[in-house]
Every structure is written in C-alpha cells, then in structure tokens.
Image (cartoon, grey):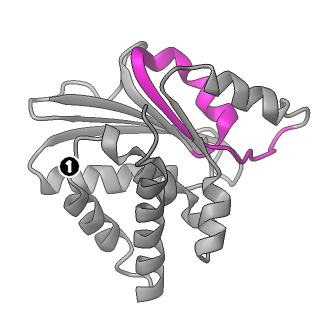
Amino acid sequence: MKTNIVLAGVGGQGILTIAAILDTAAIQQDLNVKQSEIHGMSQRGGAVHSHVRISDKEIFSDLIPKGKADLILSVEPMELLRYLPFLKEDGYLITDSKSFDNIMDYPDETKLINEIKAHKNSIVIDATKIAKDLGNSKAANIVLLGAATSKIPLSEASLLDAIKTLFSKKSERIITLNINAFFKGKELVSGINV
C-alpha cells in the first residue's frame, strides 16, 4: 500500500494542520510516512503546499514525483490547479469552492471551478460555508479532510484520535467543532459516486 497526497492552499487555511493529522494517524497505525512542506510566504495569504506520502513499506523521498499523486486536497481552488501536474491519471481532486482572493486579477471563480469539475474524479464543496455553519469557518480544512477519508488509507479512528491529539491544547469546544467538521465532510461525499 502506498498513497501520495498533495495538500494545497494559502497561509492560514490549515494545510499544515491537515498534514499533521495525516502524519499522526499514519504513525498510530504503524505506517511509514514522509512529509514535506513549502511556505510561499511566511504570512497569511502566501501559497502553501505539502506532500504527504503514506506506505506500509519504506519511503525513500518526501517529495511526490509529477504524475504520481493519488489525491490533491486543496482549501483553495486556484491552488489546486497549480498542482495538477502532480496528479496521476486516475487520481482524485477535492477542493473548497470558496476562493481566497489574495492577488490582483484573481481568475474568474466559475472558470476555475468548471476546470476542476472537468476532471472525472473531482469533488468541489463549499467547505467554508459548512464550517461557518458549524461555528467557525477556520474548520473548512477539516471538512475537506472528512470529505477525503475514503481516498486516504487511514482508519477513521486514527484520524479522529489525531484530531483530538492536535487540538488537545485548545478547548473541548474546538475539539468537538473539528470532529463535527470531519463528520460533516464525510457525510457530504457519502452519496457521491467518484
């Protein structure tokens, strides 16, 4: 078993939190994991991406070669498109529909979404709205993680334990919010046949 995941977004959207949850869950399941991350700028709004590689065998590199990603999970639609060259032919795309307009002349959002939906294995959800309805729009990343669980070779129990571990220094309310966000994302895609 080997799974390559590219995580993409901008600073402040929780890309590295998703990576940490995946890493923690993989380690709990005695799997090998390697992760790399790139911070486009050291402030909110700068491009951020991470490669997460999970395997039951030894992993020699933390970087995913082009054309080898099983999944691109993005909290920002334009950032997802930036990493399409990494996706393998039958790979999956999962993204928030809400853009983060952090540059002048941001592309037309409808065109971005249509380009993503043109891919046969794509899921686009309004994770930001869902998270906001749950009580905090910052949980959009966890909504998307929940939506991606069927494409990730980690148990629900290990992912939930990792969420609890990573948010343990926060309040019980924040832990519950993120668990609810995870289940809401999972529920949203349960009926989608991708």
Residue 36: where, in percent of width, then height? 38, 37
Please indicate, yes or no, whether residue 17 appears anywhere in the rendered image.
no
Give yes or no for residue 94 being in the magenta stretch: yes
Magenta residues span: 75-103
Q: Is residue 169 magenta?
A: no
Residue at the image position 9 percent from the left and 30 percent from the top: 57
159 or 30: nearer the viewer: 159
Identity, as a three-letter code, of the amino acid under mark 1 = Ala
Q: Which residue is mark 1?
A: 26
Place residue 109 in its image quadrant: top right
* Foreground of the two, 28 or 152: 152
Tell me: 9 left or right of 155: right
Locate residue 170, reporting x and y percent. Answer: 44, 82
Q: Is residue 94 above or below residue 63?
A: below
Quadrant in the picture for the C terminus: top left
Kindly identify the residue that appears in the image at 66 percent across and 69 percent down: 132
Looking at the image, which residue is at 74% across and 29% down? 112
**In screen coordinates, is 28 left or right of 81?**
left
Residue under the image location 44 percent in, 71 percent down:
180
Image-based side of 144 in relation to 146, left or right = right
Circle 1: element type: helix
